[in-house]
Amino acid sequence: MDKNLKRMATMHRMQVTGLELFYKNGYYNTSIDDILKELSLSKGAFYHHFDSKEDFFTEIIQNLIMRKIYNILIEPIEGSGNSLDIITNCFDNALETAVHNELDYGFVLGNFINEFNGRNPVIMKHLNDILKLWEVHLVTAIQRGKLNGHIDRHVESEGVAVFLMSAYLGIRTIMVHSSPSSRKYRFMSQMRMYFKSIQAKQQTV
Amino acid sequence: MDKNLKRMATMHRMQVTGLELFYKNGYYNTSIDDILKELSLSKGAFYHHFDSKEDFFTEIIQNLIMRKIYNILIEPIEGSGNSLDIITNCFDNALETAVHNELDYGFVLGNFINEFNGRNPVIMKHLNDILKLWEVHLVTAIQRGKLNGHIDRHVESEGVAVFLMSAYLGIRTIMVHSSPSSRKYRFMSQMRMYFKSIQAKQQTV
DNA sequence: AATGTTACCGACCAAACGGTTGGTCAAAAC
DNA sequence: GTTTTGACCAACCGTTTGGTCGGTAACATT
């Protein structure tokens, strides 16, 4: 079983480096050779483990992107406190990694959606599924907020979810260029304003 | 001068078709041959008019993207009425073209920013300049709203601008996949909620 | 009528692409 | 101790890429 362990280790290394380069240079602008050079591995090794470039990327989506997004953007909003506070904290933390130029997987997702949209339906489906998953959990969190008396019962849960996802993906597009830190601060500040407009009118805490 | 006219006509045709394909398939995933095939022109014609693929795209940015964004997202918010109403209408109109699968240049901009970020500093600078131009005009419109008594004086103009740009670019990323019409409706509805939270407290109209 | 200019053609190039193939060698299975 | 397996190598293939270049034909200038 030692062989199997080595196989998995190598495949994992390939995927981590692959995501890094795909994210940095784009999928179509990154060659398999680029990835292999970085790892000092050969073409043969690559095609021994993966069927094709597309298959390789599909594995990356499932094994790296999906899980990270779950950990960073979905699981943190499952809590039972004030939904608005929880979402605020979640976004704040997620954007903080972006400020420090680390891999922000929410942005990675939006980035790839832009790149594959209309070009590769198979990969788009996988990316869309993740987006949908995020949306569902956001809607759930907002509905919980209504039940708990933190959010006004009249607001549309799905509308809020769409608006939040939009804002998050958008701020990341803007943040990449100038003064990410101050842009994050301004963004979070306005998000709190927005939250005030949808919170329950009379505080029944 | 007939020659000069023909030259400009051909160059324009090339740029229009070029933008179409670059937008649909991505810059790096669209070859010059693809564009020329569509136009029944030859490589020689292309390099007779443009220095390189990059030069070609730079011209597209200046001649097509820049002007369209000015017409659709910047000029419409120059009016002197209620800034929040004007911006709402502007976004509503701009997103409507997106619903009908037409070229929405705001999205085109966000799309290319994602593609070129970290890959081509020269092109990124041009795209960034457009983003900055948009931001400046949004800030101006919001400050005008404060002066006219439509917007609460305490809100940060730049924060609002960043938030609005984020939301717009983000909703377009999300709209490309499923039910753009209903997503647009929900988005606009939440944007109005947000606007309520930043409008002047006592209506002094 | 002769000459220069310009828009455009299409064969060509070197480099890079995704993918294939025959082979090596150490560890696992027998 | 022999055989089998599987991770990996490296040369190679057909195709596509951005870009070059010598040529041609229509038009403008003289």
Image (cartoon, coloured by chain):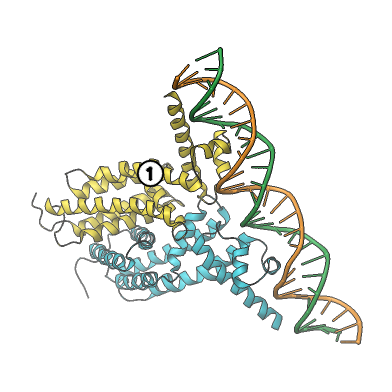
Chain colours: A yellow, B cyan, C orange, D green
Q: Is residue A149 visible?
A: no
Residue drawn 58% across and 56% down? B122
Q: How many marks?
A: 1
Residue B33 sits above or below residue A174 on the image: below
Q: Secondary structure at mark 1?
A: helix
Percent x, y for residue B187?
29, 64
Determine the residue located farthest toward the left in the rendered image. A204
Residue B99 sits above or below residue A97 on the image: below
Residue A167: image quadrant is bottom left
Reading the image, the residue beneath label 1 is A62
- Left or right of A195, for residue A98: right
Percent x, y for residue A94?
34, 44
Screen quadrant of the N terminus of chain B: bottom right
Percent x, y for residue A147?
12, 53
Residue drawn 48% across and 72% down? B68
- Left or right of A93, for residue A42: right
Chain to which mark 1 belongs: A
Residue drawn 17% across and 47% down? A82
Front residue of B149 and B95:
B95
Residue A75 sits above or below residue A7 on the image: below
- Amino acid of disc 1: Gln
Residue A79: image quadrant is top left
Percent x, y for residue B23?
50, 64
Screen quadrant of the C terminus of chain B: bottom left
- Left or right of A68, for residue B202: left
Q: Is residue B125 visible?
A: yes
Front residue of A28 and A125:
A125
> How crowded is the residue under tag 1: few (<14 C-alpha within 10 Å), some, or many (20+)?
some
Residue drawn 41% across and 24% down? A1
Residue D24: image quadrant is bottom right
